[in-house]
Amino acid sequence: MAIQHPYLLFLGDAPDQLAAKTAQGIAHWRPDWCVGQLSLEGCKADLGLPEMTLEAAREAGAKTLVIGVANRGGVFSESWITVLEQALLLGFDLAAGLHNRLADVPVLKAAAEQHGRQLFDVRHPDRDFEVASGKKRSGRRILAVGTDCSVGKMYTALALEKEMKARDMKVDFRATGQTGILIAGSGVSIDAVVADFISGAVEYLSPANDVDHWDIVEGQGSLFHASFAGVSMGLLHGAQPDALILCHEPTRPHMRGLPDYPLPTLSACIDANLAAARLTNPKVHFIGIAVNTSQMHDSAIEAYLRRLEDEFELPTVDPFREGVKPLVDRLQ
Amino acid sequence: MAIQHPYLLFLGDAPDQLAAKTAQGIAHWRPDWCVGQLSLEGCKADLGLPEMTLEAAREAGAKTLVIGVANRGGVFSESWITVLEQALLLGFDLAAGLHNRLADVPVLKAAAEQHGRQLFDVRHPDRDFEVASGKKRSGRRILAVGTDCSVGKMYTALALEKEMKARDMKVDFRATGQTGILIAGSGVSIDAVVADFISGAVEYLSPANDVDHWDIVEGQGSLFHASFAGVSMGLLHGAQPDALILCHEPTRPHMRGLPDYPLPTLSACIDANLAAARLTNPKVHFIGIAVNTSQMHDSAIEAYLRRLEDEFELPTVDPFREGVKPLVDRLQ
């Protein structure tokens, strides 16, 4: 799976900005890959990119039309399909991270075959994997783990990639979720892999590399999430991380989607991740804490970050507000 | 998935007794379900059951022909297919726990449809699952966990079921692997479920029940197996066990299939399983240790079991040699 860029970002008839969250992530982290946006009538989302027709975007070099918007009720509306089919005809590949598949829409499948174009359904792995070998491989690896789901693990990973690239370090972001895959142009949607192959898929995703090369593996879920901890555990073992970063959102009343489950303490989360990660890399250690402060009062943030820093003796940042320089300093 | 019994056990042209291990497990644990065995020319396995033709087995009441033998190189030989097709024609359902599917053999698929029979490929889940809710459900649950794969977890679970039934306790064995499913007649091959739904599939497999009812959930893998720990973790969370049993094989030089990985200590394995299991059931505790002594010198066994019993203050048994009475005593 290697999605060609530049992209034209398809926003469809997004009812609000949140529905176009995926497109927003791509535009934020890969501005150079995005030639423009394409909205349909009634679209309420705007990425601030030039609004382009399919034809204009092709002339500007776009190779893939990326569906960066959630579809309503899991169905593709007729208005979408007309545009997507037209895109294939004009020479675009299509990429989407939706639950339902582009390849399951007969007219799109037929058009892709007829015009020799590719359909990327990035939520659905397009290959089989081996069982993990557990063998140590060369190169170094970072993994962001969380107290909960959706606490900023992907954001932190991409902020690290940006900072490390700025310092001319050898680095790759290895995507394990659909938005991450569209941002990276490749990856494995790890929660859609057959259970036996979770760790094996991560070994495939982050192969042996130069000894001074870093893979930043995108984390998923949390060892403390009762629905998804198996995925987090398999990902942790397959990644064999040298460096861990703990991601946290301090205002959450309970684990995401599980009203009966309180969040773990940061200390418990650090201990559990270290204990599990040592199985495949005994030298693993935490290099910092990344806090998602979006729901906190401005006045409380600085004191909170400094308190964690003191308590855990780890650089503590909000990647969104201030970047991740102290984490990369610690890495170096 | 509910496989009808009685069974006729198909041994094919098994090259040795080990190749018919699945059939042997079924014959051992469900003798009342097995009317006979069917061998082809060259078969080197024998379960000690009456050798029967398809016709004779049908007359004796058999409803399902169970393929209790591993096929060579993942292909069904012509000699197998002729017999399997004939079985469908005579009114048998077919059940198999192989990697490749009966339903992928066109002639079998067609014959099953034509004669209204079912094909059970128990290694492949035949339905979708929900994401785990983590909600506490009524009834009580036992789970056997292991220091490694293939250390006797299924055997221990089935020995528990037998002993608890003998004591008129309300109990069900909940199968999570292919042999277990053929023995139980139903279940979910948990390592073949999509990663996101591991825990959810176990919640489905072991639903709410009477408060004095016990589910014995078949364990898989080990939290210390670098290839499969994600499955073990998700299974543990979904099972929400009240009682755990630690299964161990003391002579193993390293984790199965992983020469670089030593076995964990029993103490580490107890601690890790308790820590993880407490997430979904804070009251979980170990009720005993089950040791697979098949590779030990007879003279060393008794002292070894008593040493573990003293060290961990838990009843310690070899289920194969002496059953599991002390474990059920502790449970009661």
Image: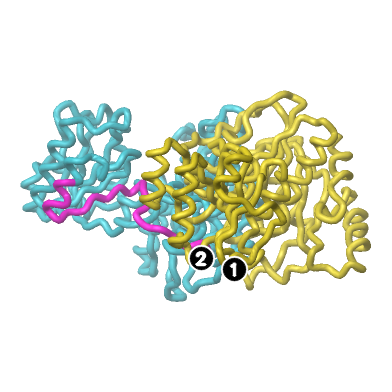
Chain colours: A yellow, B cyan
User: Which residue position is annotated with label 2?
Assistant: A72
| Residue range highlighted in magenta | B110-132
Q: Quadrant of residue A321?
A: bottom right
- Give the residue drawn at x 39%, y 63%: B164
Secondary structure mostly seen in magenta is loop
Q: Is residue B133 magenta?
A: no
- Give the residue drawn at x 76%, y 30%: A170
The image shows residue B105 at horizontal and vertical percentages of 23, 40
- Pick the residue in front: B159 or B314: B159
The chain containing the residue under callout 1 comes to A
Res. B287 in view: no
- Give the residue drawn at x 46%, y 48%: A86
Question: Pointer 2 and pointer 1: residues touching (CB < 8 Å)?
Answer: yes
| Quarter of the figure that contains the N terminus of chain B | bottom left
The image shows residue A222 at horizontal and vertical percentages of 66, 55
Dot 2: what SS?
helix
* Outermost residue, top side: A210
- Pick the residue in front: B271 or A170: A170
- Compute the Cα span from label 2 to label 1: 9 Å
Q: Which-is-in-front pick, marks 2 and 1?
A: 1
Query: Is the residue B129 above or below the residue A32 in the image?
Result: below
> Which badge, 2 or 1, comes first in the chain's sequence?
1
Res. A40 in view: yes
Label 2: few (<14), some or many (≥20) within 10 Å?
A: few
The chain containing the residue under callout 2 comes to A
- Give the residue drawn at x 78%, y 43%: A160
User: Which residue position is annotated with label 1?
Assistant: A15
The three-letter code of the residue at mark 1 reads Pro
The three-letter code of the residue at mark 2 reads Arg
Query: Is the residue B191 above or below the residue B80 in the image?
Result: below
Label 1: few (<14), some or many (≥20) within 10 Å?
A: some
